[in-house]
Image (spheres, coloured by chain):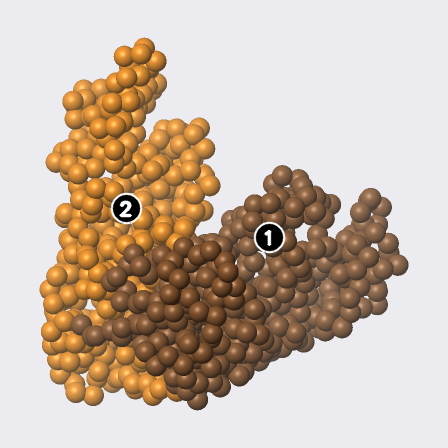
Chain colours: A orange, B brown
C-alpha cells in the first residue's frame, strides 16, 4: 500500500483538548504523528508533560523546518488566524478548531489554500465529533442536495431539553448547564446564536459552495424562549430546537438561517437531546439522512482534530468541490417564513410587517400569533428579540410560492370560508 | 485545483438502480462521467435509452480500452465476481453493489486490489445511502473503536416495526412488506439474516480489519419472532430489532454476531423505524455517534453508487487502514451472551447448555426464560431457531467477566439472597 507521511506536529494550546490530543498521540504510535513542541501562553501553569515540550515563542514552531503540521486548539480567534496564515505560508499543513476564526476569515483562508497548495482541515469546528464537513465535502453533489437542517450548538440544546423535559425556566436551565460544564460562564456566544451561525457559515460552504460571513445570515439564539413557548410546543406534539437550516430554492439560490424552530416529535432533530448535535440532510437520491453525535466537549473535539491529523497522513485536503468544481450557489434572502411569535404587549408587534397573520391568541396570559413574514423584514428589525418577544419558526418554515398562497387565501376569504 | 479524471463507464445491469444512475449522470455533466456501454442479459426488453447503448457481450465493456470504470449493479453474485475480477485485472476501476459477492470473496478481492493497484468501491453494498464504509475507513482508529451496532437490513426492520406498532403477526407483516416492495417475493435472504450477515462481513473489515466470511459469524434473522415476544418487549419499554453488533473485547479480539435483540426505547436504534437503517458507533473519544438513512431501494442504492463514481474522479481508493496500517483484529467467539428465549415446550430447551438461567416464566401461554450461554454453544446448535423457539439477545448482551459474575452469583445464593 501507499506510504504515508511522517507527521511532526507543532501545537498551539494545551488546554483540555490539547492535552487530550497529546495523550492519545502518545498511545497510538501507529499514527506516526508526534508532537515536537507546544506553544502556550502561561508558562507558569503546571502541566502533565515534560517542561522541554513547551515554549511561549510561536516562531519556535512556525519557523521550525522539521515541523510539518501546525495544530491550533486555542481560544483566541485573532491569534488563531495569524497562526494558521503563517503556517500555510511557511508550507506547513494546518488543523484548527476555531469556528469563529474560520467563519470570519473564510475568503482569505480559501485564497491562502489555493495559493500555498497546503491542506487546512477543521472538522472539529462544526459538530465536533460528527464528520459532517468531510461528508458534505465528499457526498451530496450540489445539484442533489435539497436541504440541510442541523442542531450545531450543544449548550443551547441542553438548555432547551431541560426547559422541555424538566419544566425549568430559561434561567434555571442555563444555570444547570453552567454547573455541568455544558455552557461557558459568559454564555452569550452560545445562547444568542453566535456560535451556531459561525458553524453554519462553514457548513454552507461545504454544502453549497456559498462563501459568506456570519453577519450576512439571519440568526438568533434561544435567549427569548420561555416556559410558555414550551407549553405551546408540547400541546402541539412538538419540541423547540435551535435549528440551522439551508434549503435550495426553486427560484434559485439557497435560503439559510439559524433560528429557534418547532420540530415535530417524529423528526430526527427531536431525537437530539441534551448536549448532543445532529444533522439532517435531504438529497435527491439518498432521501433523508441523519448524523448524530457529541458536538462539543474536550474529547469529541480532540477526536475530530485527531481525524484531521490522521487524514493529513494520506495527504487529504478539502477540495471545496461545491465551490470550485460545481456551479456554486448564492444565498437568497427573498423568501417568506412561517413564524410563531409570543409576546406580552400587542404594541410591540409591527403588524404591517407581516404578509398575513393566521392566528391570534390575544386572550391568554402569554399572547401569541402565527403569521408569514419576509426574511428581509426580520433581518432589518429587532422587535422580535426585544421586550420579551419570542419568535419561533414553524416546521418547514419556508414559503416559496407566496403569490399562489396569497391568491388561495384571498379566494377563501371571498368565499367566506376563513 | 487538481485536475480530475474523465470517467468513461461500462455498466452491467439496467434495472431500477442502473437506469436511475444513467438518468442522473445525464443530468449532472459536472461529474464528467458518462456511460459508454451497458451490458444486459435480456436484449428483448424495452428500455428507455438508445438501442446502441446496449450489448449482451460483456467483453465489449471489459476489453474496451477507453472504458476506465466498470459499474456492476446486477443481481447475480457469481457473474458479478467474474466481472469485477476481470475489470481489475484489465486495469479498470470497479464499483459494485453486490454485498453477497463481496462478503463471500473478500480475501481474493483484497488481494486483487493489492496486485492491480486499482480502486474497488462498494459503498452501496452496506446501508446503501448511509456512507458507513467510507466513515469507518476514514475515521475511528482501530484502537479507539469500542463497538459498532447497526440495523443493516431494511426489510426485516420494516416487518419488526409493523409487528410492533400495528400488532401484526410476522406473516401479516411480511405480506405487507412484500406488497409495498420492501421485501422480495422470496424473502429468505432478508428474513433469515443472510443479507445482514453479508453486510456485516464487509463492515467488520472496514471497522476492525477483520477478514472473515459470513459462515464464520453467528447469525439469525427474525423468522422466529412472534407477537408474544413483542408483548414482552413493550412491557419492558423496549423494542426488538435485528442488530448486527461488534465489540472490542477486553480479553482481545472482537465479538461479533447478527441476532434479534431487545433495544431500549432511548437507544438510537429504537429510532430506526420501517425500512430505514441505522448505525451506532462508540469510540474512545467521539463517544456515541449515530448514522441514519435509507438502507435499500433503487434511489438510495443509486445514490451510493454515484458517490463511489464521484470519488473515483479524485482517485479515491479504500486504504483498508485497519487491516494494513494497524494491528488488524480477529474474531473472538469465546464470549458469553445474555439471552431471552421464548418457547412452546420446555423439552426443546437444552438447559445444560446454559451457564445459568436467571428467570423462568413457565406458566404463561407462551413460556420464556432469561439466561446466559456461551456463543459457541449457539453456533453449534439449532434448537434456538426450531420448534417455534425464539432467541433474542438482551440489551448490552456480552458478558466478558464471566468468572467474576459466577462468583458473585454464587455468594448471593449462599447468602440466600437469590
Residue at 31% over, 21% down: A359
Q: Is residue A345 above or below residue A175?
A: above
| Mark 2, secondary structure of its residue | strand
**Chain at tag 1:** B
Residue A247 numbered tag = 2
Residue lying farthest to the top in this orientation: A416
Position of residue B62 in the picture relative to residue A60 (left or right):
right
Mark 1 neighbour class, 10 Å CA radius: few under 14, some 14 to 19, many 20 or more: many
| Mark 1, secondary structure of its residue | loop
Q: Are marks 1 and 2 in contact (CB under 8 Å)?
A: no
**Residue B196, percent from left and from top:** 59, 63
Kindly identify which residue carries mark 1. Answer: B183
Position of residue A174 in the picture relative to residue A378 (left or right):
right
Q: Quadrant of the C terminus of chain B?
A: bottom right
Gap between marks 1 and 2, in whole Å? 33 Å
**Chain at tag 2:** A
**Residue A311, percent from left and from top:** 32, 75
- Mark yes or no: residue B415 visible: no
Position of residue B110 in the picture relative to residue A8 (left or right):
right
**Residue A126, percent from left and from top:** 29, 58
**Residue B52, percent from left and from top:** 37, 65
Residue lying farthest to the right in this orientation: B347
**Quadrant assignment, res B39:** bottom left
Q: For this rendering, which residue is in front, B289 or A142?
A: A142
Residue at 31% over, 16% down: A412
Position of residue B258 in the picture relative to residue A327 (left or right):
right
Please name which of the two marks, 1 or 2, marks the residue nearer to the observer: 1
Amino acid at each position: 500500500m501507499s506510504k504515508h507521511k511522517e507527521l511532526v506536529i507543532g501545537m498551539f494550546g494545551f488546554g483540555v483538548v490539547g492535552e487530550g490530543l497529546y495523550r492519545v498521540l502518545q498511545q497510538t504510535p501507529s499514527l506516526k504523528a508526534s508532537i515536537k513542541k507546544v506553544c502556550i501562553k502561561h508558562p507558569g501553569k503546571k502541566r502533565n508533560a515534560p517542561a522541554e515540550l513547551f515554549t511561549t515563542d510561536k516562531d519556535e514552531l512556525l519557523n521550525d523546518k522539521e515541523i510539518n503540521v501546525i495544530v491550533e486548539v486555542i481560544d483566541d480567534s485573532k491569534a488563531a488566524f495569524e497562526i494558521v496564515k503563517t503556517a500555510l505560508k511557511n508550507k506547513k499543513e494546518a488543523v484548527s478548531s476555531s469556528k469563529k476564526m474560520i467563519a470570519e476569515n473564510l475568503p482569505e483562508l480559501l485564497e491562502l489554500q489555493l495559493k500555498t497548495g497546503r491542506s487546512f482541515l477543521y472538522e472539529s469546528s462544526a459538530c465536533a465529533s460528527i464528520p459532517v464537513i468531510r461528508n458534505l465535502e465528499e457526498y451530496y453533489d450540489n445539484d442533489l442536495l435539497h436541504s440541510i437542517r442541523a442542531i450545531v450548538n450543544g449548550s443551547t440544546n441542553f438548555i432547551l431539553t431541560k426547559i422541555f423535559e424538566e419544566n425549568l425556566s430559561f434561567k434555571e436551565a442555563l444555570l444547570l448547564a453552567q454547573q455541568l460544564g455544558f455552557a461557558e460562564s459568559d454564555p452569550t456566544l452560545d445562547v444568542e446564536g453566535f456560535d451556531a451561525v459561525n458553524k453554519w457559515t462553514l457548513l454552507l460552504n461545504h454544502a453549497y459552495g456559498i462563501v459568506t460571513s456570519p453577519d450576512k445570515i439571519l440568526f438568533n439564539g434561544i435567549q427569548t424562549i420561555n416556559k410558555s413557548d414550551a407549553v405551546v410546543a408540547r400541546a402541539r406534539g412538538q419540541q423547540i430546537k435551535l435549528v440551522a437550516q439551508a434549503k435550495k430554492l426553486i427560484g434559485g439560490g439557497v435560503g439559510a438561517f439559524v433560528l429557534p424552530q418547532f420540530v415535530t416529535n417524529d423528526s430526527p432533530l427531536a431525537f437530539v437531546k441534551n448536549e448532543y448535535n445532529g444533522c439532517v440532510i435531504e438529497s435527491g437520491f439518498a432521501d433523508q439522512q441523519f448524523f448524530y453525535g457529541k458536538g462539543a466537549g474536550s474529547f469529541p473535539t480532540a477526536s475530530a482534530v485527531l481525524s484531521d491529523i490522521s487524514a493529513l497522513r494520506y495527504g487529504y485536503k478539502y477540495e471545496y468541490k461545491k465551490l470550485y468544481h460545481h456551479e456554486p450557489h448564492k444565498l437568497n434572502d427573498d423568501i417568506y417564513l412561517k413564524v410563531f411569535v409570543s409576546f406580552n404587549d400587542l404594541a410591540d408587534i409591527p403588524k404591517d410587517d407581516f404578509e398575513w397573520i393566521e392566528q391570534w391568541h390575544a386572550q391568554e396570559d402569554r399572547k401569541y400569533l402565527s403569521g408569514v413574514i419576509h426574511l428581509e423584514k426580520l433581518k432589518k428589525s429587532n422587535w422580535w428579540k426585544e421586550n420579551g418577544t419570542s419568535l419561533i419558526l414553524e416546521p418547514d418554515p419556508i414559503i416559496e410560492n407566496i403569490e399562489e398562497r396569497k391568491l388561495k387565501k384571498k379566494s377563501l376569504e371571498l368565499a367566506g370560508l376563513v
